Image (cartoon, rainbow, N blue to C red):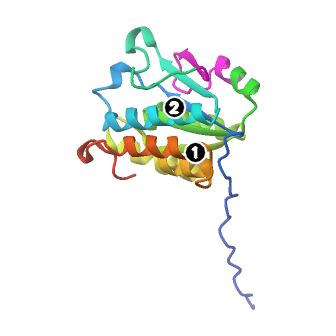
Amino acid sequence: ETIGPLTISAPPVMAVHRITPDSALLLICDVQERFRTAIFQMDHVIATTATLARGAEEFGMPIVVTEQNPKALGKTVGEVPLGKQARVFAKEKFSMCTSEVETHFRHLNRSQVLICGVETHVCVQQTALDLLTQGYQVFIVTDGVSSQRALDRSAALSLLQASGARLTSMESVFFELMRGKDCPQFKLISGLIKDAGKLPSEARLSSL
C-alpha cells in the first residue's frame, strides 16, 4: 500500500488589529486601596493605570472602571484620575462583565478593549475571556496588570495570549494611537510616557 506525502498545514495567522481612538475603550479592573500592599509590583500597575487613564481622556476614549466589593476593599486608588469619560461600577463577581457594564458597553459601541488592573489570573483573565467570547478585540496592557504572585500573573498572560488576547504595553498602546509625531496629542502623551518612566527599577514589572 502506498502512502502519499504528508501535508503540513501552516499555523493559522491571527488577524491584524490596529488600535484606534475611535474603536477602543479602556477598562480599569479593581485598582483599589486594599490591594495596594498585596499585589506584586503594585506601584507599577498604579502608575501605568494612571497614565493610561490620562491618555485615554486626551484621545476621547471611554473609560470603564470596576471596584470589587468597594465597601470592604476600598475605592479606586487616588493616583488614578477618573475624569468625565470614566464610569465606575461596583461588582461582586470576578469578571468586569456584569449586566450593568455590558449594557454600558452596548451604548459605547466600541470593538476594541484595553485592559489593566488586578488580579491578572482572576478578574482580568475572566473579563478578557468573557469579552473574547463576545467578539471583542482584547488587548492586555502587560505593565498594567499583576497578581499577588508573579507566577499567577505569568500563567494568566500565557493563557490569555493562547486564547486570542493581544499582549501589549502602555508605551506601545500610546504610540499605536498616535501613529506619528504630527498627532495633536504627541507632546502631551510623550510627557506622560516620560513621567511614567521615572518609577524606580526595583518597583517595575520587568518580564511577562
Query: What residue lies at 72% left-to-right and 20% top-to-bottom?
Result: 103
Spatial CA span between label 2 and label 1: 15 Å
Q: Position of residue 13 (x, y in %)?
A: 67, 64
The quarter holding residue 104 reads top right
Which tag is nearer the camera, tag 2 or tag 1? 2
Query: Magenta segment range?
Result: 84-102
Disc assigned to residue 91: none
Q: Residue furthest left?
A: 202
Q: Quadrant of residue 7?
A: bottom right
Vertical relation: 139 (above or below) 55: below
The mark that comes first in sequence, 2 or 1, is 2
Residue 49 spot, x, y in % from top left: 45, 34
Q: Which residue sits at x=52%, y=45%?
A: 187
- Say which element carries label 2: helix
Q: Who's the residue at 68% across and 64% down the image? A: 12
In the displayed structure, would residue 146 be above or below residue 167?
A: above
Vertical relation: 38 (above or below) 139: above
Left or right of 147 in this view: 10: right
* Residue furthest top in the image: 71
As for residue 82 lying within the magenta part, the answer is no
The amino acid pointed to by label 1 is: Phe
Residue at the spot of label 2? 53
**Lateral position of residue 162 relative to residue 152, left or right:** right
Question: Pointer 1: what residue?
Answer: 139
Q: Position of residue 141 (x, y in %)?
A: 50, 43
Question: Percent from the top left, x then y, of residue 120?
Answer: 44, 37
Q: How many marks?
A: 2
Q: Residues within 10 Å of mark 2 (few under 14, many from 20)?
A: many
**Residue 35 in view:** yes
Q: Residue at x 68, y 53 (%)?
A: 17
